[in-house]
Amino acid sequence: MTPAELAEVVLSAAHAVFTERGLDRSALPERTAVERPRNPEHGDYASTLALQLSKKVGVPPRELAAALAEQLGRAAGVKSVEIAGPGFLNIRLDAAAAGQLARSIVEAGPEYGRSDRLAGQSINLEFVSANPTGPVHIGGVRWAAVGDALGRLLRATGARVGTEYYFNDAGSQIDRFARSLLAAARGEPTPEDGYAGAYLGEIVAAVQARRPDVLTLDDAAAQEVFRVEGVALMFDEIRSSLRDFGVEFDTYFNEKDLHDRGELDLALSRLREQGHVFETEGATWLRTTEFGDDKDRVLRKSNGEWTYFAADCAYYLDKRERGFDRVVIMLGADHHGYIGRMKAMAACFGDDPERNLEILIGQLVNLVRDGAPMRMSKRAGTVVTLEDLVDAIGVDAARYALARYSSDSPIDIDVELWTRATRDNPVYYVQYVAARTASVGRNAAEVGLTRGDAAAFRPELLDHEKENELLKALAEFPAVVSTAAELREPHRVARYLEDLAGAYHRFYDNCRILPRGDEEVTDLHRARLWLNDATRTVIANGLNLLGVSAPERM
RNA sequence: GCGCCCGUAGCUCAGCGGAUAGAGCAGGGGACUUCUAAUCCCAAGGCCGCAGGUUCGAAUCCUGCCGGGCGCGCCA
C-alpha cells in the first residue's frame, strides 16, 4: 500500500464517520496526505486530519480521532491505529501490505513516481538564455542543471512543458561583441566595454577561415561579418556545450525574430488597448507603477529605438499566444530587479501576474579549489565557464551539485569534495547505491536467485526494521516528485535520494540478500531481491529526473 | 534610501503550520575470512539572529528590528 492509497483510506474513513455522526461533510478536504513520522514509535504513517477538522465541525480533536481510528482500524492492510498527543492518528500497516510496494515499484519501472498532478497545465520554461557573446558562465550552468531537472519534473507530473533558450541577438551587447572581434582580428586593443578572453581569438580565426576577405572590407562591413559569423559560431558552441551537459531545449528563440516579425509593435498596441501606455518627452512608456513597479518603464526611446524591456514584453506575449498559460523564467540574483517590472507587465497585458508569470531567482555559484574561489578561466578570462566546471568535476557531479541546493542559497562547489569517492560526496553516495543494487542483481543471477513469479512473492517476509524503513522511504518518492514540481524545487529530489540511499545501505548491512555458500534459496532471499530491485528502480528514476546517470558498476 | 535573498549544531546545509528540529563533514569510540567497508553502528554537539503577533500547535505564516549577500539606469 502506498501513502497515497492510505491517505485515500483515511479520507474515506472520515467520510464514513461524518455520515454516521451527521457532521457537515463539506468540511472535508478533497485530498489529504499522511506523513512519515521521524519517530518510529509514532507508527509507519501519521494523519493530522482530526486536528485539522475538529474546529471546523466543533468536535474535540481526540474524540474525532477516536472515531476515525475505529473506522480506520477495520481497513484492509491497516494493522493498528493509535491516538496520540492532541489527536494524531498513528497508523501501522501490516507487513504484507507494506511489502507489496516492492512489487508495485518493480512492475511500474520507469513509471514509478510519475503522476498527473499537473495535468492540464501548459508551462513554458525559459532558462540559461546567456548572451551569445561568450561561453556559458557558471551562473548560467546552475540554471542549466536546475532548469533541465525542473522540466523533467514538470513532465513527470503531467504538465505540458516547452523548454526555451532566449537568444539575445539584437541588442547593443552584440555590437560590442562584433567590435571586439574586429579589434582582435586587426591586432588592436580590446575596445572599452568590449569582450576579452582567449575564446575571442578562436572565434576570430574561425570567422577568418570562413571569410578570408573580411579584413579587406570597410569597418562597417567587416564588423557586420564578424557580428553575423561570430554570433553563429558562439551560439553553436553554447548549444553544443549544453548538449554535452545533457541539456537540450525544445526551442531556441531569436530576439531578432521578434523585431523582424513586428511583434514589438503588436505588443505595444496590445498594451495600448489595455490603456497602460503613455507618451512623454518623446518616449513611449508603460505605466507599470499601476501594478506595483517602483517606476514606469520606457518601451521606445525618444530616438525611436526599442528598449530591451519592449522586447521582453513582446517575448512574453509571444509565449502566451503560443498557448502557454504559465510562463516561468529563471534568472540570476543580479536580475532580481526585473521581477517588479515583469509582473507589472503581465498585469498590463491583462494577465494574472501570480498565475501566468513566475520568475525564479537563483543565487550565485562559486567553484572552489583549495579553499579559494576560482575566478579565472582558461578561455574566458574572468568568468568561470561550463567547461571549467565539467573539466573539474564531470557532468554527473556538476549536475547533482548544482541541483542539490535550494536556488535561494548561494553555493560553493568544492572541487575536491565533489570528486571524492566517499560518503561525504553526495552524488557518489547515491550512485553507489545504483551500482550496489546492480551488483547484487548480477551476483543473484550467478547463484540462481531470481525474483521469480510475482505471484510467489511473499511481501509479509519483509518485516525486519530496516526493510520496513526502506519500504517507507521508497513509498515517499511519488510525493517527493510532485512536491518538487509544484514548488519548482528539484533539490528535494536530491535530498530524498540521499535519504533513500542511507535506508538502502542500512538494509544491506543488516539483511543478507543472497544465500551464503551452499545455503538454499528461500522465499526471504527472493523477497529481499524484490526490495533490492525496487530500490534500484527508484534511485534510477530519481537520478534521471536530475539528469544524472545511474551506473551499473563503479 | 528602496527592493530581492539569506540567518538552524564548530563547518556546509535539509526541514511546502505538526509530536522529542534532522543529515553530512570535523572532533570522540566501534564493526571488514564483504552480497562492493566506496559501507555501517554508537556517543557528543541547538535561546532555529532578536522581539512581538496569528494559531489547538510556529524554525515554518505576519510585523518590526539586527546582521550578511546581491541589486537600483531612456544599459543589456
Image (cartoon, rainbow, N blue to C red):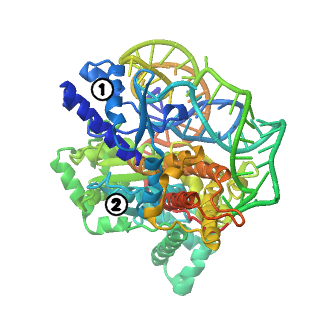
- Give the residue type that dot 1 points to: Leu
Give the quarter of the image for residue A385: bottom right
Circle 1 residue: A53
Q: In this view, does A74 lie to the left or right of A337?
A: left
In the image, residue A273 lies at what x, y percent?
A: 15, 49
Label 1 CA crowd tier, 10 Å (few <14, some 14–19, many 20+):
some
Tell me where residue A549 sits by quadrant. bottom right
Residue A237 image offset from top left, x and y in percent: 53, 72
A95 or A363, which lies in front?
Answer: A95
Q: Which badge, 1 or 2, comes first in the chain's sequence?
A: 1
As shown in the figure, which amino acid type bears the numbered disc 2? Val
Residue A136 placed where, x, y %? Answer: 54, 63
Residue denoted by label 2: A161
Pointer 1 indicates a residue of which chain? A
Q: Can residue A299 be seen in this view?
A: yes
Residue drawn 23% across the image and 60% down it: A321
Task: Please identify, in this view, whether the residue under mark 1 or under mark 2 is nearer the observer.
Answer: 1
Q: Mark 2 lies on which chain?
A: A
